[in-house]
Image (cartoon, rainbow, N blue to C red):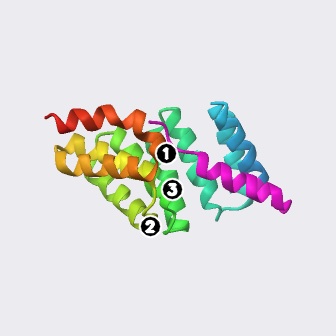
Amino acid sequence: MKLPITIAAVIVVLAAACGELSEAEEHNNRGFDLAEGERWQEAIAEYDRAIELDPEFAAAYNNRGIAHFELGNVEQAIADHSKALELDPDYALAYYNRGYVRLQEGDLERALSDLDQAIELKPDFAAAYATRGFAHREAGNTGRAIADLGKAIELDSGLEEELHPALDNLKNQ
């Protein structure tokens, strides 16, 4: 499961439709477009410029964290997601992304804490339930894993094909 950047895409499209983007937002959007093409280094350069122009731009830190993670720069990814949360403590997507990185690094306790927070802030966040389900599976919490994967499918039926095998496997343990 890759980090979801589709939420950011909606924000980019809506802001562009209004025609009122700041220079920092324009650089963030360019970075986002580059990230969609997996041009991570170039994306980071655009996010860097966005942050230089607007040091309070939480989304640019969050997006740069995704790019750093994709390049294997885990510490920088966590630092960027943490900075985004320092700037915007209610940023569910940044909690999700930091939780995802922590899960990939085997830091289950802190991954679960971040994913819990993402879900608390955005109760319909299907990807957060799915990822928390995988974290619970890794932690040996089978019942919680089943519940979260089921909730993710309930919230987004498009995840069923991806999650159903894991869910069946857990139910058969």
- The question of residue 44 being in magenta is answered with no
Give the extent of the magenta segment. Answer: 1-25
Question: Against 162, is 17 above or below?
Answer: below
> Measuring 71% from the left and 50% from the top, which residue is drawn there?
28
Amino acid type at circle 2 is Leu
- Of mark 3 and mark 1, the one earlier in the sequence is 1
Q: Nearer the viewer, residue 64 or 155?
A: 155
Q: Nearer the viewer, residue 57 or 2?
A: 2
- The question of residue 11 being in magenta is answered with yes
User: Could you tell me how far apart the alpha carbons at marks 2 and 3 are, in whole angstroms?
Assistant: 9 Å
Q: Residues within 10 Å of mark 3 (few under 14, many from 20)?
A: many
Residue 160 picture location, percent across and down? 40, 39
Question: Against 68, is 154 above or below?
Answer: below
Q: Nearer the viewer, residue 19 or 66?
A: 19
- The residue under label 2 is 121
Quarter of the figure with the C terminus: top left
User: Could you tell me how far apart the alpha carbons at marks 2 and 1 are, in whole angstroms?
Assistant: 21 Å
Q: Quadrant of residue 95?
A: bottom left
> Measuring 45% from the left and 60% from the top, which residue is drawn there?
124
- Of mark 2 and mark 3, the one earlier in the sequence is 3
- The residue under label 1 is 77
Residue 66 picture location, percent across and down? 54, 43
In the image as oriented, which residue stretches furthest toward the right? 19
Amino acid type at circle 3 is Leu
Of tags 3 and 1, the one toward the viewer is: 3
Question: Against 99, is 21 above or below?
Answer: below
Q: Is residue 61 visible?
A: yes
- Of mark 2 and mark 1, the one earlier in the sequence is 1
Q: Dot 1 lies on which element?
A: helix
Looking at the image, residue 13 sits to the left or right of residue 130; the answer is right
Residue 158 picture location, percent across and down? 48, 41
